[in-house]
Each structure stands twice: as C-alpha cells, then as structure tokens.
Image (cartoon, helix red, strand yellow):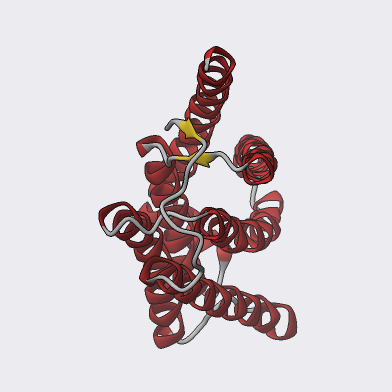
Amino acid sequence: MAAAKKYDTTSPYTAANLITVCGFFSALYSIIMVQEAWIHYERLGSLAWPISSSYKTLAAIALTFATDALDGFLARRWKQRSKLGALLDRARDKFIIYPLVYYLNKYLQLMMNHGQELSDLHSFLKVLIWAILIVEGTLILGGIVAAAFGWRVESHRTGKWKMGFECATVGIWMLAFLFSNPAVFFAHWSFKVFVACLTISALLAMASFLSYLSSWYNGSATEANE
C-alpha cells in the first residue's frame, strides 16, 4: 500500500464505482436478513431459520466480497481510480462489517449460558471482536484523512485477505441459524472453523493496521523530500 497525490479521474460515473455501489446493496440485504434472523430468535426463542434464507444471506455476503475484489481491480486496470471511489470502497467494507459484528457479539453472549468452558472462550472471542472493531475504526479515520488531503491509498494485499476472512467468519456464523439450539452449533465442527477464521481475521486486522502505519510514514517522508 502506498500513498500518492494523484488520482486517475475525477468523474464519479465509472464502472468501478458502480460495482462498489452494488456492494452497498448486497451488504444492506445481508444486514437486513441477519436482523430478521435475530428478531425471529427473540420472538420464538429458536434460532432455526429456513435454509433458503441462510443461503441467500451467504450469497449476498459473497457478492459483497466479490465487489470488494473486483472494483479495485477494474479501477486500476481501466485507470478509473478516484477520490470518491476510494471513499466508497472503504465505506462499503465497514458498512457490512460493523452491523454484522454487532449481531455476532449478541449471539456470542449466548455462550455464557452453556458452561464455564464456553464462557471462558466467549471472553477470548470478545477480545478478538473488539480488536477488529478498533482497527477498522482507525482505518476509517485514516481513510477520511487521506481523502481530506487528496492522497490515494492503495489497498494492501493484507487488507484484502482480512476482508475475505471477515466475510468467511460471518458466512460460517450463518450456519448457526440452521440450528434451533446454540449448544448444537457450539459442539459442531463449523464452530471450530468459525473460531479459527475469527482469530485469523483479528491477526490480519493488526497486520493491515501496521501496513497502514508504514504507508503513512513512508508517504509523509516521500512528500517531505519532494
């Protein structure tokens, strides 16, 4: 990831920006579906959810990640990198992650009622979630500062992997809504994969944050010498 002073275009009407906007709609659909699942649980006391609903939500999450990978690629290939595109890209990523992590945290609260071992694991997972949220919040502020000064911040490969594992974490969590009892999910093999993905997401978030710090430092040093 490197900071620079120039964009390719000032026009907001680009194919890359259109794909990013499509990502907003798929992200919004994902959030609405997860909220619907949670309301279903609060009303009926059961997490059992139609399989079709879980698949639709998984498809929407996958589409959101696909737009994240495709818009940047097309912007670079077709010389469509813009200030608006950079803002939309970062806003789309956080738009889906923050609400879904909020509901994920609410779901993990259920672990407190299923034994001391899960209660201890809940504390560990909560630390990971807060680490992700703090890092993502810091990256949002960094993106705002970059936009304010007109810097172009290239996405680092670590950030793409981070986004991928975050979406995978939420996607695997969608399997939880297929079980009527949270204890069944906690004992299922998919829960172990979920914990692994969440842990990797937190580590990649930290690595992404460090790459941003390095970029800011190197970018500032470069501009000071120009």
Residue at position x 47%, y 68% from top? 174
The count of marks equals 0
Q: Nearer the viewer, residue 134 or 218?
A: 218
Q: Residue furthest left?
A: 77
Residue at position x 39%, y 45% from top? 160
Q: Is residue 77 visible?
A: yes
Residue 61 in the image: above or below residue 2: below
Apparent side of residue 101 relative to residue 190 in the rendered image (left or right): right
Q: Quadrant of the N terminus?
A: top left
Apparent side of residue 5 relative to residue 98 in the rendered image (left or right): left
Picture quadrant where residue 80 is located: bottom left
On the image, the x and y values in percent for residue 38 come to: 66, 75
On the image, the x and y values in percent for residue 72 come to: 37, 55
On the image, the x and y values in percent for residue 157 come to: 35, 38
Residue at position x 69%, y 58% from top? 102
On the image, the x and y values in percent for residue 220 come to: 58, 20
Picture quadrant where residue 190 is located: bottom left
Residue 158 in the image: above or below residue 16: above
Picture quadrant where residue 145 is located: top right
Q: Is residue 120 visible?
A: no
Q: Nearer the viewer, residue 150 or 181?
A: 150
Q: Nearer the viewer, residue 164 or 82?
A: 82
Q: Residue furthest front?
A: 226
